[in-house]
Image (tube, grey):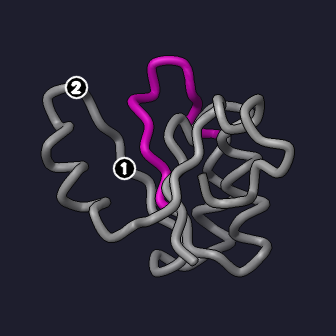
Amino acid sequence: MKYLVTGGAGFIGSHIARTLLEQGNSVRVLDNFSTGKRENLESLTRQFSPDQFEVLEVTCAMTLMCRTRCAAWRSFFTKQHLSLSRNPWRSP
């Protein structure tokens, strides 16, 4: 399955991305790096192929482009999913 993790360069988001990748899923991380760190994603970039793992750095001005590139991705994770669901790995 394909997952989009918003805020994926942060501590929580990067751990969600790692877990999803280790379960055999494809992950696309969307982050503006205002508080997230590239270092949180470096090992994932080395460990997983570009077909499995992609990082998109975005700004508010790039929102339309992101909608187009992520349209086929059905499942989304944000930090809010951790508090809204007993099972955060389930599709919202």
Distance between the Cα atoms at labels 1 and 2? 13 Å
The residue sitting at 50% across, 40% down in the picture is 6
Q: Relative to residue 31, is residue 67 drawn left or right?
A: left
Question: Residue 29 location, x and y as percent?
Answer: 49, 51
Residue 92, compared with residue 20, is above or below; it is above
The residue sitting at 77% across, 41% down in the picture is 85
Residues 24 and 43: in front is 24
Identify the disc placed on residue 60: 2
Q: Amino acid at mark 2?
A: Cys
Residues 86 and 7: in front is 86
Residues 74 and 9: in front is 74
The residue sitting at 67% across, 55% down in the picture is 17
Q: Nearer the viewer, mark 1 or mark 2?
A: 2
SS for dot 2:
helix
Find residue 20 and report its image quarter: bottom right
Q: Which residue is mark 1?
A: 56
Mark 1 nearby-residue class (10 Å; few <14, some 14–19, many ≥20): some
Mark 2 nearby-residue class (10 Å; few <14, some 14–19, many ≥20): few
Residues 40 and 12: in front is 12
Number of labels in the image equals: 2
Q: Relative to residue 78, is residue 68 drawn left or right?
A: left
Which stretch appears magenta?
28-39
Q: Quadrant of the N terminus?
A: bottom right
The residue sitting at 58% across, 37% down in the picture is 78
